[in-house]
Image (tube, rainbow, N blue to C red):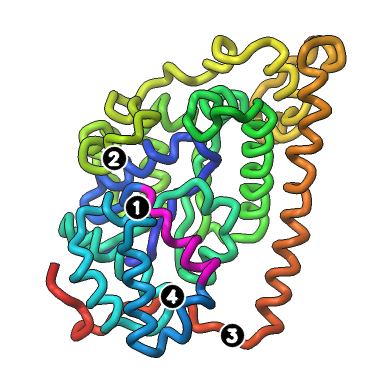
Amino acid sequence: MGSDRPVFVVGCPRSGTTMLQLMLHAHPRIAIPPETRFLLGAYLDRASFGDLREPANRRGLAEWITGGKTAFGDLGLNSDAVIEEIVTGPPTLGSALGIVFRAYARRFDKPRWGDKRPAYLNNLGPLLRLFPDAQIVNIVRDGRDCVASLGETPWQQGKDVCHAISDWARAMDSSAWARRVLGEHSYHEVRYERLVADPEPELRAICAFLGEEYDPAMAEPARLAEVAVPSRKSWHRLTHEPVTTERVGSWRDRLEPWQVTLCEAKLGGRLRELGYPVSEDRSPWWGGPGRVHHLHYAHIDGPRRTVAARRALTRLRDRLRPAEALAYRPAEPRELLPR
């Protein structure tokens, strides 16, 4: 019998989180949906939903979750049934959110559920307040490949390369925090490059962390792409193809030389710490077209350097204020509704 702890897939955007989501979703006991995009919003706006011990407030929360402003429609669930299950379920925010994920797992007759979103990596504190027994699987990829891939996404259009570089730097700082603070039974890290080169041993290690048996179907995630990846997300087109090493090191062809120089100037320390080789003989940043971006980077990345201090203050405030009833509680059998 495997565990029933929730599983969350995290990582810098374009690190392979969707591929890993599909690999885990291929497991016969685990269901990981497409990005739902309501968990963090619900947490940030939790005060607006009122006291969830009141059924009317739970209904308001449920209607917000299933409404048109979230990605609930991608889950293939009956919104009326989910709303009623939340209303009759335990009166905590984590429970209401967990009910949605559990309903998605029931759709595939699986006992274990989770979620995937890159943004969770920079919000592990709130995630663990909602789901204290969560297991986090973080996928890490060469920052230069992430920067190159981010530059091809719709949400990066109109932004310069500094935004993508800063995104990876912040994600790696969050990863370092997780390695220091979270225990080995709560946090597991996998490298994208090793996962695509030889999936089975990496997936076996993930399964051992999760307390599950490895299933060979996990190494063929493309089989599930039609079911678990919304067709409108064209940037995930490679998930419909077999796992490949084709994009490993592709930054050499996809980035301009000055962009590589800028990446390594800003990310070199983190890249070396993670074991990624960095060139030592590149021209200095001030000698080429990247010098303007080098100066602009401080403007983009500067505010993000305060994230660690802000999180420490948030944790202190949470300890000082009255405890909130946030954590997920499994519903009693009588509270479960049919699929």
Pick whichever of labels 3 and 1 is earlier in the sequence: 1
Q: Residue type at mark 3?
A: Ala
Pick whichever of labels 2 and 4 is earlier in the sequence: 4
Measured in 3D between alpha carbons, the distance from the residue under mark 3 to the one under mark 1, in whole angstroms, is 30 Å
Q: Residue type at mark 2?
A: Pro
Q: Is residue 102 left or right of residue 178?
A: left
Measured in 3D between alpha carbons, the distance from the residue under mark 2 to the one under mark 1, in whole angstroms, is 10 Å
Magenta-span inclusion, residue 224? no
- What residue is shown with label 4? 93
Measured in 3D between alpha carbons, the distance from the residue under mark 3 to the one under mark 2, in whole angstroms, is 38 Å
Q: Which mark is residue 184?
A: none
Measured in 3D between alpha carbons, the distance from the residue under mark 4 to the one under mark 1, in whole angstroms, is 18 Å
The x, y position of residue 58, in whole percent, is: 36, 80
Query: Residue placed at 40% from the left, 57% from the top?
Result: 7
- What residue is shown with label 1? 71
Q: Which mark is residue 230?
A: 2
The x, y position of residue 278, in whole percent, is: 71, 20
Q: Residue type at mark 4?
A: Leu
Pick whichever of labels 2 and 1 is earlier in the sequence: 1
Q: Counting other residues with Cα less than 10 Å from the Cα at mark 1, is it few (<14), some (14-19), or many (20 or more)?
A: some
Which image quadrant: the N terminus? Answer: bottom left
How many tags in the picture?
A: 4
Query: Residue placed at 82% from the left, 17% from the top?
Result: 285
Pick whichever of labels 4 and 1 is earlier in the sequence: 1
Extent of the magenta region: 35-45
Query: Residue placed at 39% from the left, 39% from the top?
Result: 18
Which image quadrant: the C terminus? Answer: bottom left
